[in-house]
Amino acid sequence: MIETKNILELFKPIVKEVLESMLKEEREIYLENNPPTKGNGFYERDLKTAFGELTAIRVPRTRDNGFKCALLPYRKRITEDLDALIRAMLISGMSTRKIAEVLKELYEIKISYANISRISQVGIEEIQKWRSRPLMEEYAVVFLDAMVFPIKRDRVENESIYVAIGITPEGRREILGYYLPGGMESAYNWREILQI
């Protein structure tokens, strides 16, 4: 059986890609609201999360130096808050109103629902692109497992996240998909997932 820590490690490239896309969209909104300035490339920074350390995150910047990313904690290298935000977006598909509440609560910032909608839509599109990517025709081994995480909807409850991991003939691990049908692990949920 593959350990939860190893599964979370496999999610790191996906999380990084989604985060970078959302940061670019956040800068785009800033540029639209501040027409005299322009984008000024990127700088890289590392961030320690529950997924492991995300290295060389490409953070956008502007010529006027006025743009500050709301999605990244300012001057912090470790964040539990970012994990909560990304997990919630990856797994449960939060509404723009809920994302606004989370950002206000965690970062003490106010972003309009329209801007959050734009930023989260980019994240959702990246996730959908990842979920609909072509898979290899053959894997040497496929592991199916469920991990239990506390997930907050109306209240915090433990729910199972079902994960399919493939091992390529070359020995490389790859997440094939993840599913959150709700509730705890059950034969019924496995049957539904395997019929997808």
Image (spheres, rainbow, N blue to C red):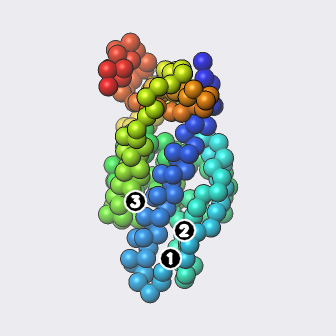
Mark with earlier residue (2, 1): 1
Tell which of 14 and 48 is nearer to you: 14
Tell which of 166 and 186 is nearer to you: 166
Q: What amino acid is at disc 1?
A: Gly
Mark 2: secondary structure: strand
Left or right: where 52 falls relative to 71: right
Q: Is residue 177 above or below residue 99?
A: above
Q: Report the disc number at residue 60.
A: 2
Residue position marked by numbered label 3 in the rendering = 119
Question: Residue at 53% of width from left, 65% of height from top?
Answer: 69
Looking at this view, name the residue that lies furthest to the bottom: 36
Quarter location, residue 174: top right
Contact check, label 2 and label 1, Cβ < 8 Å: yes
Residue 177, how many percent across, how many down? 44, 32
Q: Report the disc number at residue 39.
A: 1
Question: Residue at 54% of width from left, 20% of height from top?
Answer: 141
Q: Is residue 75 above or below residue 152?
A: below
Q: What amino acid is at disc 3?
A: Ile
Residue 29, how many percent across, how many down? 40, 70
Question: Label 2: few (<14), some or many (≥20) within 10 Å?
Answer: many
Decide if residue 191 is in sight here: yes
Question: Label 3: few (<14), some or many (≥20) within 10 Å?
Answer: many
Left or right: where 54 falls relative to 84: right
Question: Residue at 34% of width from left, 16% of height from top?
Answer: 191
